């Protein structure tokens, strides 16, 4: 059963595909837009842009540190570089270059980490970016975005490129459930309430938004009304939406495809602790690396399912 199936959500495109489509369309509008690739453009979906605008596409080969440094130079010359590679290659391998060549000088570089999370499946733990959000959030002045479906990703890509400053955009490999069949009203730093509720709030991003919607559906027969919030922008975080959810529903569950430390859960907990402390529970990968396996099997094994989110809601709601 795919995430979103309990609630009747249809399957849509992978967020990496939506990113590539949006990038290609934006290339016709913004002549300063360029791409910098690490020889994986066919996987990150920057290849269509490179074919359409070959004089604005730079492939540095399998050398992520050079990838970021070149992008910093292009940004310093007035270009808008989109740097795309697997999340683990980009954020882990080139972190020092991102820190010194992008974040410290606050250059207008768009960092795109694809194939994020454990849902890449058989490629295994060496390819799974599960600490990338924590690394990106640790960099001063860097905006961090994790869209939930194709429509959200297309709008997020546009907003990221229009934004003046460094950004990290996280997208995934596999197809995901459609959260916004009629299009997404997207604004950086502003959460989206996907579903209203009064007894608890599930805050999620990425593919876990579909799990949150499913969990809310499963909670209905239990008499628990769940609000679902798509917190696509982790930094800057929507403090008002979180504080309101805590005050109005009295319990919060956070669900993410990331390590327990330093991701969405930590960011939400900071806001809740500072504003309106309420019972909380967290669904994530934990403090461990995953393994190679079928994508759905991995999500099941590591508890990234609607059922585990539902159990977390019951736990948090019961402590109110």
Image (cartoon, rainbow, N blue to C red):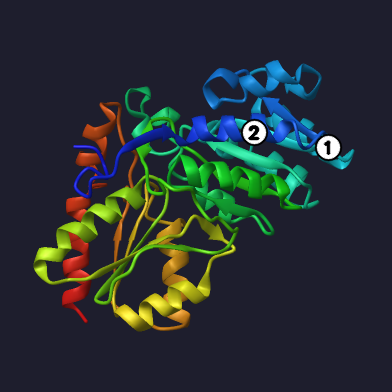
**According to the image, label 1 marks what residue?**
79
**Residue 245, image x, y percentages:** 38, 75
**Residue 24, image x, y percentages:** 65, 29
Q: Residue at x 46, y 32 (%)?
A: 115
Q: Residue at x 69, y 31 (%)?
A: 65
Q: Nearer the viewer, residue 164 or 319?
A: 164
Secondary structure beneath disc 1?
A: loop
One can see residue 183 in this view: yes
Secondary structure beneath disc 2?
A: helix
Mark 2 is surrounded, within 10 Å at the Cα level, by few (under 14), some (14 to 19) or many (20 or more) other residues, namely many
Quadrant assignment, res 37: top right
One can see residue 309 in this view: no
Task: Say which label, 1 or 2, has the lower sequence index.
Answer: 2
**According to the image, label 2 marks what residue?**
23
Q: Residue at x 44, y 78 (%)?
A: 243
Quadrant assignment, res 25: top right
Which of the image's four quarters has the C terminus? bottom left
Q: Nearer the viewer, residue 228 or 311?
A: 228
Image height of 189 relative to 198, above or below = above
């Amino acid at each position: 059963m795919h995430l979103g199936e309990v609630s009747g959500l249809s399957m849509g495109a992978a967020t990496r595909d939506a990113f590539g489509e949006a990038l290609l369309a934006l290339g016709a509008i913004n002549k300063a837009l360029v791409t910098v690739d690490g020889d994986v453009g066919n996987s990150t979906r920057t290849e269509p842009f490179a074919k359409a605008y070959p004089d604005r596409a730079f492939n540095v080969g399998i050398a992520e540190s050079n990838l970021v440094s070149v992008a910093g130079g292009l940004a310093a010359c007035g270009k808008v570089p989109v740097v795309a590679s697997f999340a683990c290659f980009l954020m882990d391998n080139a972190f020092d270059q991102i820190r010194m060549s992008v974040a410290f000088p606050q250059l207008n570089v768009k960092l795109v980490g694809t194939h994020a999370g454990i849902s890449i499946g058989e490629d295994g733990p060496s390819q799974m970016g599960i600490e990338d959000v924590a690394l990106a959030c640790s960099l001063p002045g860097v905006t961090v975005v994790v869209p939930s479906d194709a429509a959200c990703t297309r709008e997020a890509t546009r907003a990221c490129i229009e934004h003046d400053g460094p950004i990290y955009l996280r997208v995934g490999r596999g197809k995901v459930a459609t959260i916004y069949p009629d299009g997404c009203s997207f604004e950086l730093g502003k959460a989206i309430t996907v579903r209203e509720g009064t007894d608890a709030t599930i805050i999620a991003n990425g593919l876990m938004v579909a799990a949150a919607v499913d969990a809310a559906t499963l909670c209905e027969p239990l008499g628990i009304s769940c609000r679902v919030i798509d917190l696509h922008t982790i930094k800057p975080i929507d403090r008002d939406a979180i504080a309101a959810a805590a005050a109005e529903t009295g319990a919060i569950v956070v669900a993410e495809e990331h390590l327990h430390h330093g991701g969405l859960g930590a960011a939400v907990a900071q806001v809740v602790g500072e504003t309106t402390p309420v019972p909380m529970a967290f669904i994530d990968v934990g403090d461990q690396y995953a393994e190679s396996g079928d994508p759905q099997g991995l999500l099941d094994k590591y508890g990234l399912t609607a059922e585990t989110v539902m159990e977390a809601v019951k736990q948090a709601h019961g402590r109110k």
